Image: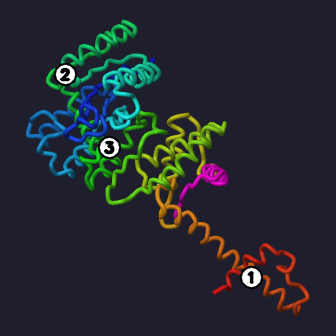
Amino acid sequence: MSEKVYIFGDEFGTSTLNQNDVKNITHFVYAAIVVKESNLDKAREVRDNISQNFFYGKPIKSNSRVLKDETKRIEILEYLIKNLNFIIYLLVVDKEKLSKDTGGLRFKDVFYKYFRGIFVSQINNNFSEFEIFMDNLISDKYSSELKNYIKQNYQNNFFEQYHISDDKEEPLIQLADFVAGSYGRVFNASFMSNNSEDIFYTLKPVTPNIIFFPDKFDNKTFVVNPEKQIDSEVYEIVRNDAIKIYDEIADDIFKAVLDYLLWHQKVLPFKYAQTYEITNALKYNSGKELSIENLRIIVKELRFKGIIIVSSSSTSGYKLAVNKSDVHTYFTHYLNYILPMLKKIEIANGVFANKTVGDFIPLSDMEELKNLVETLSIK
């Protein structure tokens, strides 16, 4: 029997749709941390230590003035991850997409829908025993409606395991608040900084899955480094072709690799996904092992299908192209192989042509390759 877990949830953002949000919070972030019962006392100890050492003994708040220096936020996240075993469930709602595509669908209805998807299906599948403590979301009226919804739609035993609380009654909710606020600085442009990428990478090892609404295949990209630019035309061409191939292929391993590259393109469009990150994600999500060599074979096959998977001689890993520079890198990568090969052919052809005094010139019988080699000498 698996060990009981405790889940603490909080949010970053408002339920106001984008066009009315004076704070310009474009993405609502809901985070929940999951702690095993055997680590519960340790979690309380870690929370107390963070409060004492970083917040002068006060409650941990993601919007605290203490965190005006973003490097302090990263320092606290690193301390949390180093000293406590836990994972994060994360839901990111693109409010702009919601307002445009749903005809004014109320935000709470979306949360109800995806609460079921995240917490009921994932938690019921992963844990036999659990308790959930959620912060008093948005307002007392909202929380009451949400609790009534759960009571009406789910089994009584689930309802008994679900609690609406606040961070004074249950201080561990403060850790969820801190995580949600940190991710809010990754996904909301008005809160981004030069540290947003570091925040994402710090939290990534303890966040095995991020669920997006709308679905990640249709959602916009999140740029965590505002200094770099996405070419929307290139981005859409590459992404749409990749999604089309994803829908067509039947092999689960191929789909899993492409799924990860699509996710990575959206969340970290300018970074290369390391090979071990791809294989580890595949193992975690499907339980299937994939060697680096087989990953390279899959990438090669996907490229033959027309998907622009970029790799670079100076940077390890793979990524889907998001701008013209990526496309040039893709072409240059192969050019670095093609030109030396053609040069070797030219040299070998000259060896035989010279030593047979023109009686045997291999390229004379290979018109296409001859034309390619001749391009080397064109000035």
User: Residue 237 location, x and y as percent?
Assistant: 54, 51
* Label 3 Cα crowd, 10 Å radius (few <14 / some 14-19 / many 20+): many
Query: How many marks can you see?
Result: 3
* Label 2 Cα crowd, 10 Å radius (few <14 / some 14-19 / many 20+): few
User: Residue 44 location, x and y as percent?
Assistant: 21, 29
Identify the residue position indicated by label 3 in the image: 187
User: Residue 164 location, x and y as percent?
Assistant: 24, 17
Say which amino acid is labelled 3: Phe
Say which amino acid is labelled 1: Glu
Q: Earlier in the sequence, mark 2 or mark 3?
A: 2
**Front tag of 3 and 1:** 3
Identify the residue position indicated by label 1 in the image: 346
Q: Is residue 90 visible?
A: no
Q: Tags 2 and 3 in contact by the CB under 8 Å rule?
A: no
Q: Quadrant of the C terminus?
A: bottom right
Residue at screen point 20% across, 33% down: 47
Identify the residue position indicated by label 2 in the image: 139
Q: CA distance from mark 1 to mark 2?
A: 75 Å
Q: In the displayed structure, does residue 344 sit left or right of residue 98?
A: right
* Residue 256 quadrant: top right
Q: Earlier in the sequence, mark 1 or mark 2?
A: 2
Q: Quadrant of the N terminus?
A: top left
Residue at screen point 50% across, 54% down: 319
